[in-house]
Amino acid sequence: MNNSAAFTQGSTLKHVVIMTSTTSIGLMTLFLVDLVDMFFLSLLGEIELAAAVGYAGTILFFTTSVSIGIAIATGALVSRSIGEKNIDKTKSYAVNVMCFGALVALLISSLIWFNIPFLLDLLGANAASKQFAIDYLQIIIPSMAILTVAMSASGTLRAIGDAKRAMLATMIGGLVNLVLDPIFIFGLELGVKGAAYASVVSRFAVIGFALYYCINVHKLINRFNISKFFQDLPSITKIAIPAMLTNIATPIGNAYVIATIANFGDSAVAGMSIIGRLTPVAFGTIFALSGAVGPIIGQNYGANQRNRVRSTVIDGIKFSIIFVGFVSLILFLTQDWIISTFKASGDAAALIALFCTWVAATFLFNGFLFIANAAFNNLGYPHYSTIFNFLKATVGTIPFVFIGAQFANQSGAIIGQGIGAVIIGCIALYLCFRVINRIENMDDKPLQKTTFHLRFPRWPFSNTRG
């Protein structure tokens, strides 16, 4: 295993660009497969299928968010121990967080599997789309533990600086899914069930390669020891539980959006489903920011190089502004092609056009929230991540979506969602710099407390003392 803290030296901007790019390539491969799933299913010509994937995707977003929370905890603990040059602790955290994640995933997936029809009723699924969604979810939900361990293993690789192999593991899984999709959906005539089976197989591919790199290349996984597991459990839960709560807030907010849009019919839900698959492909790099920036912050914080923590956050902001601006322009210019490719019409086409023209640009502020959350999780303030994501899912989503829907139906709903993201993202970024200011003012003393009082006003980007 390479035990050097690679992120404590060299340009932080270079680290941000490389880590985000490699992480996003792997993520976008998986997200692209979801988009291809939607494309293949749209060829079957049933609007209920597209709506079903939207309903199912809302529930799967919840399970994936839990898995991402575990991966974030892995990255925070492993990167910090690497920065401290404590290799024994690194190996212990790597295996024990994976085991913790597997147990959590088994519990959650069991609860969801037995309540799939009830959850779909809450989302407003009608009879036809509901049955398609049930068929899809009953196959894919039991593989949640596989996904969780796979993402945790990939998070471990990123935390030690091996972003390339983390990327390869997820890319391989995505390519497996891409190859199997048409075979299962059309060749075996399994339809939506075929898409689910392809996704399950791809998850096994990801976990196989990610664990191979962790075990055989980096010699990072020790034999499981129950006593060490319980020794590490307080440290794991201190970060993992807030990180999971942080991530599940987003699908809760999205569930409200889907339930609101369901009032306007399957065509509107189909449009939202396409947007839901398009967004992570277009902005996969921004989704990757939290997992990519986190290890850089963690290593530098563990090594007491706190000036580099600030520069990492600022470089992440610069990267986000440039990337979101570029992608938003591309979406605006290609919106007609996107609509025709997915054979969208009526309300579905109108929603896609609105998203590509106006709403997509607001994703920049989601990027700000992702960066702030990465800082909170790696600097000892994980509860702030939880608070802000729940604020975004509740007061940053529900009132804006509700009011927007009253004035402009489904179009107003997604505009309201974008406005909420702008407000919460700005506030989270402000508090992020207040946290960094406090850490820098501690004169290299270890962080003891996780609360402090804000003093307004002060421009947070400044590192002025006092």
Image (cartoon, rainbow, N blue to C red):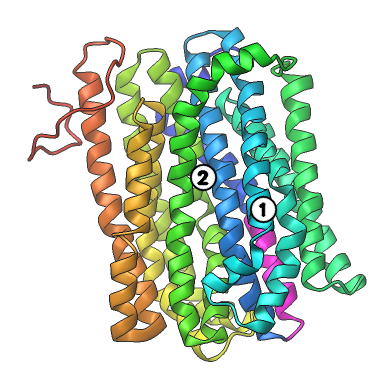
Report the residue at 80% width, 58% height from top.
198
Q: CA distance from mark 2 to mark 1?
A: 12 Å
SS type, badge 1: helix
SS type, badge 2: loop
**In the shown orientation, is residue 370 left or right of residue 176?**
left
Q: Is residue 391 above or below residue 455?
A: below
Q: Is residue 164 above or below residue 176?
A: above
Q: How many marks?
A: 2
Q: Nearer the viewer, residue 256 or 94?
A: 256
- 451 part of magenta stretch: no
Image location of residue 293, percent across then percent down: 45, 34
Amino acid residing under circle 1: Leu
Report the residue at 48% width, 14% height from top.
83
Quadrant of residue 464 within the rendered picture? top left
Residue 180 shows in this picture: yes
What residue occupies the far right of the structure in this picture? 188
Image location of residue 300, percent across then percent down: 41, 19
Q: Which portion, as a residue range, is magenta?
A: 29-45
Around disc 2, counting alpha carbons within 10 Å, would you say few (fewer than 14), some (14 to 19), or many (20 or more)? many
According to the picture, the residue beneath numbered tag 1 turns out to be 30
**In the shown orientation, is residue 28 left or right of residue 20?**
right
According to the picture, the residue beneath numbered tag 2 turns out to be 288
